[in-house]
Image (cartoon, rainbow, N blue to C red):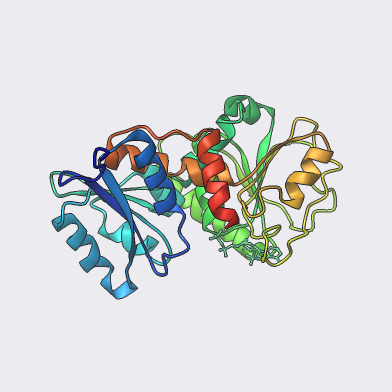
Amino acid sequence: MSTPRITGKARLAGVLGHPVAHSLSPVLHNYWLERLGVDGAYVPLPVAPDQFVTAVRGLQAAGFRGANVTIPHKEAAFAIADEVAPMARVAGSVNTLVFGEDGRIRGSSTDGFGFLASLEAEGIDIGAVRDRGAALLLGAGGAARSIAAALMERGFSVIVTNRTATRARELVETLSQAWRDHAAGAMPALSTLPWDHPAGVPADVSLLVNTTSLGMAGGPDASWAPDLTGAADHLIVADIVYVPCETPLLEAAATRGLTAIGGLGMLLHQARPGFRAWFGAEAEVDAATVAYVSAVLKR
Ligand code: ATR
């Protein structure tokens, strides 16, 4: 018989959500645990909103190392954390809780890290992209806010465009206030652009990020792609949609000869900080990880 992987000393973590069955996190973390031979387990934790606090306290009492938090618990996660990382405050989101041995709960947001890491993994020099122009974000929801916060931390000027213009303006105002309250250093420029901007993607934009559900299979418009004719030749195009892997936006970027980055990398990289904190090992997003998760997504 082979050596048992999960023993009485196993390190434990999980994902709290409602519903949680769609979450890829258990698949991903258990893949890494198995591959690295770590004595640990990561489980789905379906928890109704009114049971969130009881569940978190219960997990702490049961010796869990921490948990990921997904819809609809992100605000509750913010509230229960004893310490929230400054950039999580700017992002307005907590998706990772780490239970300290001192009984304290530390909350952080790893989506922005995951986004930037997915670009770096493709060989993109983030500082050089920032020096070439601004980042244009399509969409004004939670994902846009997390990515905007991470880009601001790296010194990017950020432009937000959204179908509903008031949401874009609200996002800029909220981010400005949160940056002043929680971040260190000068605030990069933040602005909005009309959604139906006639020139398409302006030539002074060096990074375009789709944070909307446009282009997603089963989304509002699966064939959507913006006009890239006026875009700079060095434009990097990123999509956070990962089903399909090749969205019409990424296809349009590739046709135009631009670097195109899909959303799966962000999903995988955002899991790494939690894995390290709970299981004490370094998870790698390599070709085998991408192939494994892609195969699960296609099932
Ligand atoms: P999340 O928090 O995951 O980012 P969200 O708040 O639901 O998600 O945001 C979805 C984004 O997709 C929004 O920016 C939304 O635009 P509106 O604010 O105008 O609703 C955008 N979106 C969804 N359907 C769209 C469509 N058909 N055309 C343009 N934008 C769309």
Q: Position of residue 124 (x, y in %)?
A: 62, 28
Q: Is residue 170 left or right of residue 69?
A: right
The quadrant in which residue 203 appears is top right
Q: Position of residue 100 (x, y in %)?
A: 19, 45
- Residues 164 and 42: in front is 42
The picture quadrant for ligand 1 comes to bottom right
Instruction: Give the position of the C terminus as an image quadrant.
Output: bottom right
Q: Is residue 171 left or right of residue 221?
A: left
Q: Position of residue 134 (x, y in %)?
A: 66, 37
Q: Position of residue 266 (x, y in %)?
A: 53, 43
Residue 229, placed above or below residue 122: below
- Residues 267 and 141: in front is 267
Task: Name, please, the residue furthest toward the front.
Answer: 1
Instruction: Give the position of the N terminus as an image quadrant.
Output: top left
- Residues 164 and 6: in front is 6
The quadrant in which residue 34 appears is top left
* Residue 18 in view, yes or no: yes
Q: Residue at x 56, y 30 (%)?
A: 120
* Residue 151 in view, yes or no: no
Number of on-image labels: 0
